[in-house]
Image (cartoon, rainbow, N blue to C red):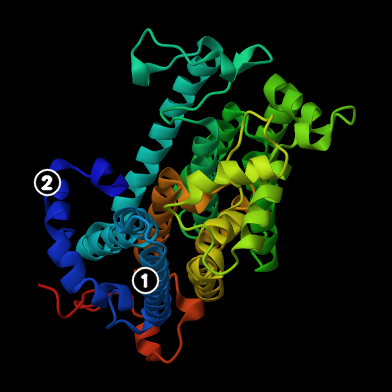
Amino acid sequence: MLLAMLLPSGAQASLSGIVGPRFLFIRGWKPLRGPWPDHPALHALRKTFGGLWQGILLLLAAQILLLLCQLVRTFLADDSLTLTLTSHLRLLGKQGLYGTFLVLTFILAARRFHEHRLKLFTWQAQGLLIASVLLGLYMLGQRTWGWDWIHGFQAKIGEHRFAYGVYRASGLMGHPLSLAYNCMLLALVSFAQGLWLQGRDRRQAWIWLLISVVNLGLIGLTGSRYPLALTLGLMILAMLIHTRLGSWRNLLGLGLLALIPISAVFLFDPVMMGRIQELLDSTVAVEDRFDRWIFWKVHLQIFMDQPWLGTGLANYDRLLLDYYDQAGYTHIERKYTAHNILLQTLADSGLVGSLALLVIFFALFRAGFRTLKDFRHQGFLLIALGTLLGGLMQNTLRDSEYLYALWTSMGLCCGCLIAGGVPHESNGRSHLQDHQSGEDIADRHAHVRRPDAGVDSNQG
């Protein structure tokens, strides 16, 4: 989708022709198995995409297993089969099916436009930077005057978002926290791409790093404490990994780049400081300062009572209120979901449902470590860490907005690796020269690519 918005009209028409359902499902296997498989420099990419595709198939299998188990239990308990079926199919679609479409869209677009792939992702970086800055300007107005243009130019955000003299901005989304976690993903992917391009394309590298900094600022405008701290922590980790891999150049500049938003948000932002002081106020009970503690206790009890299949997605909402009452929390107003993807899955899907969750993280971390080892690109690894650690405080993998951002970020990483990882002329050296093995020495030092390099022999 990002590619389609940023391409010229003629390219959009071509893109729409190659990403239809028939093309994706019939011709999707080979692209995921290995874009440009004829070139020996891309064997590592073939393994990465093959592993990612296997992980998606395994995820779908785990979700189908959970669905079958829940259908059997529903039939025996004489509950609504229709409600059970629709709730599980919705989850299967969010966590697996349309994610496959998004990742394939990026991969197939990078394959189709291989002649202009570097220009394509330069356009995309510039478009993302402009879009992020425009969103930031809107959020500044939203934060100051309470704009809510989604509901009309005269509409304002509710007073429940007003604290410490300003509004918590949510951009074009319904809740500030949803926007914060989505901006976290874009900030991390952009930061990884910027680090990776430091020794390849300095100008484009700084564009990606600016995208990362702007999105870090957007998280600050939402007033969301944990996503901001998590994003900053993972950026610092990425810089340390980058240094350990021997890339010392511009490290000081990158460090200063990270310190700017830290200082601006934590030293001058009244919302962030006020919310942090609330959390540290020892005169208030822990459960009042940190209501997630209550959510976690209730959902742990649900899991202990029904460990194998949980409550079932269809019965979860009805049984949740009963468990809050049984735990003695009838008086609290916010009887929410777990705000922890691990406990949420265990509560409503049990140990069987948690298999799908394990598969998601396994596929992400597997792709992350492979791309770090073979290409020194940290995008997948940062996505995996951000999703896992973010899921400790939020039901991220049940949130449609986050899942869309997650799959899009994965597709963006795939496209960036294809665009920047394909060897091309650069003073007689390819970008992947340090990672290639087994090629002919004459091919490694050739100044002119073979006519068929980077082209799938099975494509027209």
Tell which of 106 and 119 is nearer to you: 106
User: Which of the 4 image quadrants contains residue 305?
Assistant: bottom right
Q: Mark 2 Cα within 10 Å, few/some/many (few <14, many 20+)?
A: few
Q: Position of residue 24 (x, y in %)?
A: 20, 65
What residue is shown at x 16% (from left), y 47% (from top)?
Answer: 12
Q: Position of residue 231 (x, y in %)?
A: 62, 46
Dot 2 falls on a residue whose secondary structure is: helix
Q: What's the mark number on residue 353?
A: none
Q: Position of residue 60 (x, y in %)?
A: 37, 70
Q: Amino acid at mark 1?
A: Leu
Q: Confirm whether residue 95 shows in the render.
A: yes
Q: Is 456 positioned to the left or the right of 447 in the image?
A: left
What residue is shown at x 33% (from left), y 13% (from top)?
Answer: 152
Residue to which mark 2 is pinned: 10
Q: What's the mark number on residue 68?
A: 1
Mark sitting earlier along the chain (1/2): 2
Q: Is 177 positioned to the left or the right of 15 in the image?
A: right
Q: Amino acid at mark 2?
A: Gly
CA–CA distance between discs 1 and 2? 45 Å
Q: Confirm whether residue 249 shows in the render.
A: no
Tell which of 246 and 96 is nearer to you: 96
Q: Is 292 positioned to the left or the right of 205 in the image?
A: right
Name the image quarter holding the C terminus: bottom left
What residue is shown at x 51% (from left), y 71% (from top)?
Answer: 352
